Amino acid sequence: MSFIETEEQKALRQAVAAMVANYGQDYYLEKARAGEHTTELWNEAGKLGFIGVNLPEEYGGGGAGMYELSLVMEEMAAGGSALLMMVVSPAINGTIISKFGTEEQKKRWIPGIADGSITMAFAITEPDAGSNSHRITTTARRDGSDWILKGQKTFISGIDQAQAVLVVGRTEDHKTGNLKPALFVIPTDTPGLSWTAIDMEIISPESQFQVFFDDVRLPADALVGSEDAAIAQLFAGLNPERIMGSAMAVGTGRLAIAKATDYLKTRQVWKVPIGSHQGLSHPLAQIHIEVELAKLMMQKAATLYDAGDDFGAAEAANMAKYAAGEASVRAVDQAVQSLGGNGLTKEYGIAAAVTASRLARIAPVSREMILNFVAQTSLGLPRSY
Ligand SMILES: Cc1cc2nc3c(=O)[nH]c(=O)nc-3n(C[C@H](O)[C@H](O)[C@H](O)COP(=O)(O)OP(=O)(O)OC[C@H]3O[C@@H](n4cnc5c(N)ncnc54)[C@H](O)[C@@H]3O)c2cc1C
């Protein structure tokens, strides 16, 4: 592992930062407040090869790894455009389909995911299961060679802007009636699939939805990967998801610190800029250290993942997600404090991050479930649930 990024990685950071700067945080917030999507930015990111940077070259991707995709995510968030669908479409779905999909599925979905012309939502969370994904009940039963899917999901991001959704469900063993996990890819115009928006207090151009599967008929080839190995296949998408959650939080932390730093240098209410007062400079320096530490763990997780060490990557990705979530929440809070009243105005764009940054403590896996994982897996402690 090297602590020094390659020239290509540095150039990628600069190129992503330059693209996002052309739009700016104001663009992201204006779209969000108008209830619109950031389609122009998404399309440009796709055209420039940023969305599919981790996906295989033979299917139109960039042939790089999660390190590069997390770098894209971090720079987008640091530039004020933390797009959730980056976590979902190329990182979770692109990874799962390119690793476990059939040749047909790869050809059908990966080139579009890579260039952004296809956005794929991801649906695992259910109202009655929440963090306990072993309790999900969305079930597919066989009907000839087809599947009939029935169930409900919640908090599904961006299904309104997606052409397809990757659903984590269960299949029913026709002999025993036992349910086992299975993954299905479903075009969003399939009859029987519907959704309603959840009224969220997050200022984001990407919305969350309750999703309903009302006897959705699916062809046999909707099943992704093996019916008997869905858990392992799902896990292949979870490390990328956590690494991307970390990247989003690290970028958001950087954005908050940058805004606060600018303000502390110029705002003067006594004889010196307010950044001279250690009551403001020290907490910001502390948060800067915490964001950098979280970033280091994220880079370790991505490096391990790209090297094929899934087990090592899982521990590091969980730790990175925890650390980045905590650091970004504190960075945003300290940025609000640094700006005084302006921290709560629309003009400075910090207040909008207060609710959004809290997401990093909740999704894709909550802070408590990460602590459970570390307590049990890293420390070998018994579980309480
Ligand atoms: C903006 C947003 C976007 C999302 N996008 C998606 C998406 O695209 N696709 C998708 O499938 N899901 C998505 N989610 C769902 C997200 O993954 C869940 O909200 C998250 O996993 C937590 O589940 P829950 O909300 O049901 O909380 P619950 O599971 O009900 O948990 C509530 C609280 O209890 C704690 N808790 C639960 N069990 C334990 C335990 N054993 N020990 C200690 N504490 C515990 C949790 O940590 C949490 O603090 C999104 C959520 C949000 C808010």
Image (cartoon, helix red, strand yellow):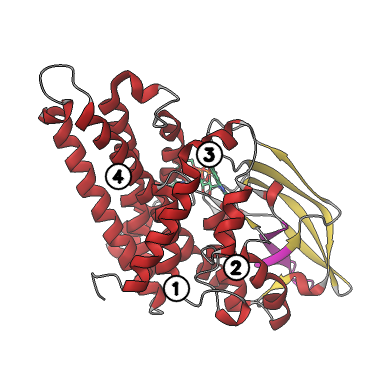
Q: Is residue 6 magenta?
A: no
Q: Is residue 12 above or below residue 73?
A: below
Residue highlighted by disc 2: 114
Lower sequence index among marks 4 and 1: 1
Mark 4 to mark 1: distance in Å?
Answer: 25 Å
Residue at position x 42%, y 38% in the image? 358
**Which is closer to the viewer, label 4 or label 1?**
1
Horizontal side of 45 relative to 283 (left or right) equals right
Instruction: Judge by depth and name the residue closer to the eye, 271 or 233.
Output: 271
Instruction: Judge by depth and name the residue closer to the eye, 258 or 229.
Output: 258
Q: Which mark is residue 327?
A: 4
Mark 1 to mark 3: distance in Å?
Answer: 29 Å
Mark 3 to mark 4: distance in Å?
Answer: 25 Å
- The quarter in which the N terminus is drawn is bottom left
Instruction: Judge by depth and name the residue closer to the eye, 77 or 233.
Output: 77
Give the residue type at disc 3. Answer: Tyr
Instruction: Judge by depth and name the residue closer to the eye, 146 or 324.
Output: 324
User: Bounds of the magenta span?
Assistant: 163-185
Mark 2 to mark 1: distance in Å?
Answer: 13 Å
State whether residue 354 appears in this view. Answer: yes
Q: Position of residue 200 (x, y in %)?
A: 58, 33
Give the residue type at disc 4. Answer: Ala
Residue highlighted by disc 1: 65
Residue highlighted by disc 3: 27
Mark 2 to mark 4: distance in Å?
Answer: 30 Å
Q: Which class describes the residues within 10 Å of circle 4: few (<14), some (14-19), or many (20+)?
A: many
Residue 271 falls in image quadrant = top left
